Amino acid sequence: KAGVTQTPRYLIKTRGQQVTLSCSPISGHRSVSWYQQTPGQGLQFLFEYFSETQRNKGNFPGRFSGRQFSNSRSEMNVSTLELGDSALYLCASSLGGSLSDTQYFGPGTRLTVL
Amino acid sequence: AQKVTQAQTEISVVEKEDVTLDCVYETRDTTYYLFWYKQPPSGELVFLIRRNSFDEQNEISGRYSWNFQKSTSSFNFTITASQVVDSAVYFCALSVPQTGANNLFFGTGTRLTVIP
């Protein structure tokens, strides 16, 4: 079974631009969660989507948004990029039927904002 | 509030030595889940183990073992006879479904370097 895939793997953007990251979950998984990893803040939860609905949200500004499609693939968008948005963005998928399901992570997208 | 503490920032060991990574968690909920993930240089978080709060049995998987003690709120991870391939950052994480969410609360990670 293929794992979680994320595209692109690397991105370089400039301040003020917007960016869209994509995540394809493990086949059969209906929940997709996004996390931001930075040296200063560590791993922080952004949001989770289940059956095309945002089920849970972390403490990030509205510039960070996401969506999920009917095939469970998810996209994350960051508008008006700031230098502090430079990070590794990790996507995780789980079966989703239970809030205790194990989350499996993708390789991440490394975003650099110049 | 939920919190995970990994007090060891970096550990270096010589190959074949045993090493224990510490994890202390905080939660007021009675039902929770604990996880360990490994992050090699490639960046992907690799799932290692999941335990629920009602199962305090220790677990062994090959060279890996985990010690869960509710009395001390700890979930420590031991690697026996370490190998160079074990070099990575290891994260302990907590989830509390009773809050209505499945998000993971991560510790700050322990960077393990195994020296050949």
Image (spheres, rainbow, N blue to C red):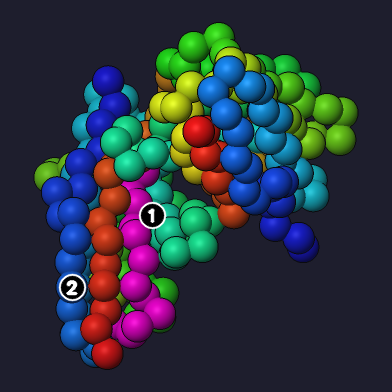
Residue B80: where, in percent of width, then height? 26, 81
Question: Disc 1 marks which amino acid?
Answer: Trp
Q: Is residue A31 left or right of residue B49?
A: right
A57 horizontally vs A42: left or right: right
Q: Nearer the viewer, mark 1 or mark 2?
A: 2
Assign a secondary structure to mark 1: strand
Identify the residue shown where x is 39% and y is 39%.
A38
From this view, report whether residue A37 is shown above or below residue B91. Answer: above
From the image, tell me which residue sits under label 2: B12
Asked whether residue B101 appears in the rendered view, the answer is no
Q: Quadrant of residue A18?
A: top right
**Chain ID for label 2?**
B
Report the span colored magenta: B82-95
**Is residue A61 toward the left or the right of residue A39 in the image?**
right
Q: Quadrant of residue B62?
A: bottom left
Asked if badges 1 and 2 are on one and the same chain, I answer yes
Dot 2: what SS? strand
Q: Position of residue B56 (x, y in %)?
A: 29, 53
Q: Amino acid at mark 2?
A: Ser
How far apart are the alpha carbons under marks 1 and 2? Answer: 19 Å
Q: Residue at x 34, y 58 (%)?
A: B90
Return the residue at label 1.
B36
Q: Is residue B33 above or below residue B22?
A: above
Quarter of the picture containing the C terminus of chain B is bottom left
Measured as percent of width and height from the top left, residue A87 is found at 47, 38
- Residue in the image at 25% along x and 56% along y: B110
| Number of residues whose C-alpha sits closer than 10 Å to that of mark 2, classed few (under 14), some (14–19) or many (20 or more) | few
